[in-house]
Image (cartoon, rainbow, N blue to C red):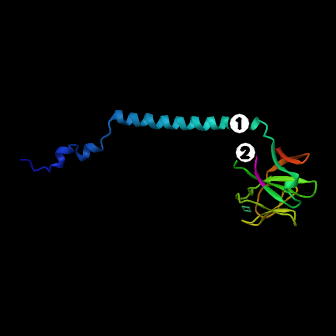
């Protein structure tokens, strides 16, 4: 009778052989890793191409509100140019509207409209933007807020694109 424990009959691979990798296994892993890297690069290139194709397209025209829905000094949140891109429509006075991306250009906190001071305020680090054009008045924001083109058509307010700065 052998002195070897019974489990050795069920698992006959020695400890040394367990770490042995054949050339075939190594080549197989190399091919798999290279294939995965190629696929990831292909996906990144495809996404970049899709984004570049999107850049050339005109932005959608979207009805944001009826004039009567927004009193002077009021603000209305909407998404533009697509869902998940929050913007604020401001009514500066009886005739003038303005709209901006709501994410602060510093670290992305939502800005809030202060109609008495005609500013957009970022409460995270005390950033201030001019409500008329979104330029930085004070605080850490490095750039103006992205501005949405607004058109008043009769009783309706439409977003028609982004203002190039
Ligand atoms: S996130 Fe707006 S000032 Fe810092």
Q: Position of residue 150 (x, y in %)?
A: 86, 47
Q: Which mark is residue 52?
A: 1
> Helix, strand, or loop for circle 1?
helix
Q: Are marks 2 and 1 in contact (CB under 8 Å)?
A: no
Q: Position of residue 137 (x, y in %)?
A: 84, 62
Label 1: how many residues lie within 10 Å, few (<14), some (14-19) or many (20+)?
few
Q: Residue at x 19, y 44 (%)?
A: 10
Asked where in the image residue 122 lies, by quadrant, the reply is: bottom right
Residue 109 is situated, as x and y percent measured from the top left of the image, at 71, 60
* Residue linked to disc 2: 82
- Total residue callouts: 2
Residue 78 falls inside the magenta stretch: yes
Residue found at x 69% / y 38%: 51
| Disc number placed over residue 71 in the picture, else none | none
Vertical order, 92 against 38 (above or below):
below
The earlier-in-sequence mark between 2 and 1 is 1
Q: Nearer the viewer, residue 20 or 63?
A: 63
Residue 65 appears left or right of 39: right
Q: CA gap, disc 2 to disc 1?
A: 17 Å
Split into quadrants, the picture shows ligand 1 in the one at: bottom right
Asked whether residue 33 is in view, the answer is: yes
Say above or below: 27 vs 93: above
Question: Percent position (x, y) of residue 59?
Answer: 78, 40
Q: Is residue 68 left or right of residue 2?
A: right
Please name which of the two marks, 2 or 1, marks the residue nearer to the observer.
Answer: 2
Residue at the spot x=76%, y=47% of the render?
80
Magenta-highlighted residues: 77-82
């Amino acid at each position: 009778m052998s002195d070897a424990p019974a489990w050795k009959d069920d698992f006959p691979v020695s400890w040394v052989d367990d770490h042995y990798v054949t050339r075939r296994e190594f080549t197989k892993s190399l091919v798999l890793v290279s294939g995965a890297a190629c696929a990831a690069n292909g996906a990144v290139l495809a996404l970049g191409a899709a984004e570049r194709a999107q850049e050339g397209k005109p932005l959608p025209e979207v009805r944001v509100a009826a004039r009567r829905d927004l009193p002077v000094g009021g603000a209305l949140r909407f998404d533009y140019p697509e869902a998940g891109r929050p913007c604020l429509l401001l009514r500066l006075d009886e005739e003038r509207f303005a709209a901006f991306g709501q994410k602060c250009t510093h670290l992305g906190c939502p800005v809030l409209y202060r109609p008495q001071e005609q500013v957009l305020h970022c409460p995270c680090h005390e950033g201030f933007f001019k409500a008329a054009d979104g330029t930085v008045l004070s605080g850490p924001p490095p750039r103006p807020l992205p501005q949405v083109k607004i058109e008043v058509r009769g009783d309706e307010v439409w977003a028609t694109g982004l203002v190039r700065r």
